[in-house]
């Protein structure tokens, strides 16, 4: 099974931090900084899931979700990462079709649990790729 996770963030430090957490969970992070770069990656590579900053230089998470939903070969959970840690932003992301919404900077265990839940939801017949301590 594919272990690649696309990490989309305009901020280099945020990409690095998110990628480090993704890597610690046993996945292969593939960082990029724009929606256009992510779409280019999607045309060349399969991904298990996506982590996407809420606002990007050339779009936002809603456009990424629309891209994933409109392309049958791209079916993957999208976890939105945002510096806006408020209920309204959470609801907006969930109503748009995000799998989960994590505030930035994330607590590593919070992001690990979101990754594990996304993998289980995408592949219900499989066990999680990694165990997350309670």
Image (cartoon, rainbow, N blue to C red):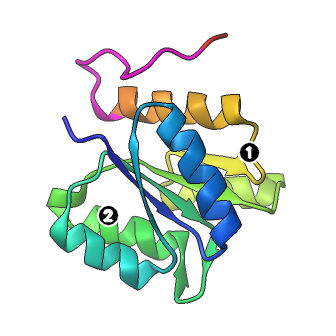
Front-lying residue, 115 or 91: 115
Q: Residues within 10 Å of mark 1 (few under 14, many from 20)?
A: some
Return the mark for residue 106: 1
Q: Is residue 104 above or below residue 106?
A: below
Return the mark for residue 68: 2
**Main SS category, magenta section:** loop
| The N terminus lies in quadrant | top left
Q: Is residue 46 magenta?
A: no
Q: Does residue 101 appear left or right of residue 46 in this picture?
A: right
Return the mark for residue 37: none
Q: Is residue 94 above or below residue 3?
A: below
Q: Position of residue 38 (x, y in %)?
A: 37, 73
Q: Are marks 1 and 2 in contact (CB under 8 Å)?
A: no
| Residue located 42% across and 65% down the image | 65
Q: Position of residue 68 (x, y in %)?
A: 31, 64
Give the residues drawn in magenta, as a range: 122-132
């Amino acid at each position: 099974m594919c272990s690649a996770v696309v990490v989309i963030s305009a901020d280099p430090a945020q990409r690095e931090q998110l990628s480090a957490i993704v890597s610690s969970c046993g996945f292969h992070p593939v960082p990029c900084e724009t929606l256009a770069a992510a779409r280019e990656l999607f045309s060349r590579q399969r991904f298990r899931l996506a982590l996407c900053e809420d606002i990007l230089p050339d779009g936002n998470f809603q456009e990424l979700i629309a891209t994933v939903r409109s392309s049958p070969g791209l079916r993957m959970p999208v976890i939105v990462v945002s510096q806006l840690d408020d209920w309204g932003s959470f609801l907006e992301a969930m109503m748009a079709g995000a799998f989960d919404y994590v505030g930035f900077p994330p607590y590593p265990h919070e992001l690990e649990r979101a990754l594990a839940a996304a993998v289980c939801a995408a592949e219900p017949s499989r066990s999680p790729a990694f165990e997350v301590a309670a």
